[in-house]
Image (spheres, rainbow, N blue to C red):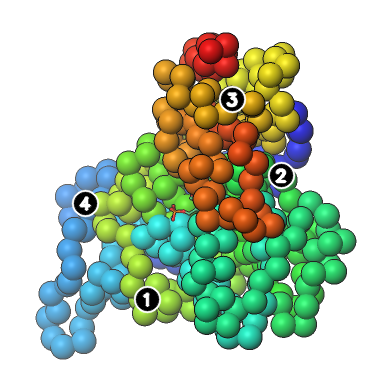
Amino acid sequence: MSEAKPNGHDRPEAGRPSQEPGLDAPAGYSFGTKAVHAGLTPDPSYGSVIPAIHQTSTYAQPAPGEFAEDFDYSRSANPTRAALETALGELEGGHGVAFSSGLAAEHAVITLTCEAGAHILLPNDLYGGTFRLVDKVLAHWGLAYDLVDQTDLDAVERAVRPETKLVWVETPTNPLLNVVDIAGVVARKGEALVAVDNTFATPVNQRPLEFGADFVVHSTTKYLGGHSDVVGGAAIARDPEHYERLRFVQNAVGAVPAPFDCFLVHRGLRTLHLRMAAHAESARAVVAMLEARADARDVRWPGFSGMVSFRHDDAVGVVQRTELFTLAESLGGVESLIEVPQAMTHQSVEGSAAAVPADLIRLSCGIEDPQDLAEDLARALDG
Ligand SMILES: Cc1ncc(COP(=O)(O)O)c(C=O)c1O
């Protein structure tokens, strides 16, 4: 098993300047306190502790062009989404923008930082959908890319070209769980900007903007939502100008999340710190069981989060024999999931330099009793 240090601290520095004064929890509190309060203030009309879900497409205007804040039409802005965006910004230490999926957030960051003729550096182990977006959609519009092992910082430096506009980092990577030194990449990026997919680590374990990254991206579908009941995404910018451009792309392209989905993700954020600790305890128990067995090879867990991967000769059989681990794509929910990336989440990297081994099993360890999870998987391995 590889134990790696996350790029994180226990207590963050004071949060970003508020996008909406009065909505933020006061700066200086620890992460857990911020997670509970970020972006939430009692409803001014009725005092409801949880603000109403603004399930509306539009807003009444007393006179043409007169409206509250930037609320004229819900593709442009919505109060439920604004509250989530404030919270996301506060937890990552930047300015948050919510999208309808993680891939929509990725698309926004890549298209605002790159143009035709530009070059993007991708990790050689990454979420298959990210590769597909660049290789099958954006390459068609003139974006060039290279895949590089970002655990090798010299290789990163060698791969950066004059036309490299963005270094895309995923850490830990999906599905091999390699940990990349964010500050090391930032030191070798040349003139490029750096975006970090923080989906697997979450801001509980790692806040990339503190290490000099320019953008953080999340599939909020995963740990931030945390309950496998919503698809969503987020991009968080360090620079206010990048934030304004993200907002522009969000409105211009229109991949916005529905108010109810924003409410669900925001509710998930409030227990993120507790869930991440429980996910890690589950993973620890499962990894201890796997490491004691000869049939589980190349056991990988970065030492935080609930994501574990290992190789097994009967991968396809094992994933069909668990009871508590559900065979399904996705990750980061309170319930445990198991999958074979090569046949499921990573089909789009087949045949590329980012292809994953067919005998790899990926676990998303949930927050059930850790021993129950270890025993469930052990029974499946026994056949
Ligand atoms: C690391 C990572 N980033 C991004 C995404 C894409 O997110 P979404 O499915 O919300 O579009 C995923 C989805 O699995 C992922 O695992």
Q: Which numbered marker is on residue 314?
A: 3
Task: Give the Cα distance between marks 1 and 2.
Answer: 33 Å
294 vs 218, nearest the viewer: 294
| Rendered location of residue 345, percent (x, y) | 50, 46
- The amino acid on which the numbered mark 2 sits, given as a three-letter code, is Asn
Q: Which numbered marker is on residue 253?
A: 1
Residue drawn at point x = 46 percent, y = 20 percent: 322
Q: Which numbered marker is on residue 52?
A: 4
| Rendered location of residue 251, percent (x, y) | 35, 76
Task: Give the Cα distance between marks 4 and 3.
Answer: 50 Å
Above or below, 70 relative to 15: below
Q: Residue furthest right?
A: 154
Give the quadrant of the N terminus: top right
Residue behind mark 2: 178
Residue drawn at point x = 37 percent, y = 39 percent: 228
344 vs 104, nearest the viewer: 344
Circles 1, 3 touching at the beta carbon (< 8 Å):
no
**Classed neighbour count for the residue bearing mark 2: other residues with Cα under 10 Å, few (<14), some (14–19), many (≥20):** many
Above or below, 213 relative to 346: below
Pair 4/2: label in front: 2
Sequence-earlier tag: 4 or 2: 4
Pair 4/3: label in front: 3
Residue drawn at point x = 37 percent, y = 76 percent: 253
| Rendered location of residue 118, percent (x, y) | 65, 82
Q: Is residue 132 visible?
A: yes
Pair 1/3: label in front: 3
Task: Give the Cα distance between marks 2 and 3.
Answer: 23 Å
Sequence-earlier tag: 2 or 3: 2
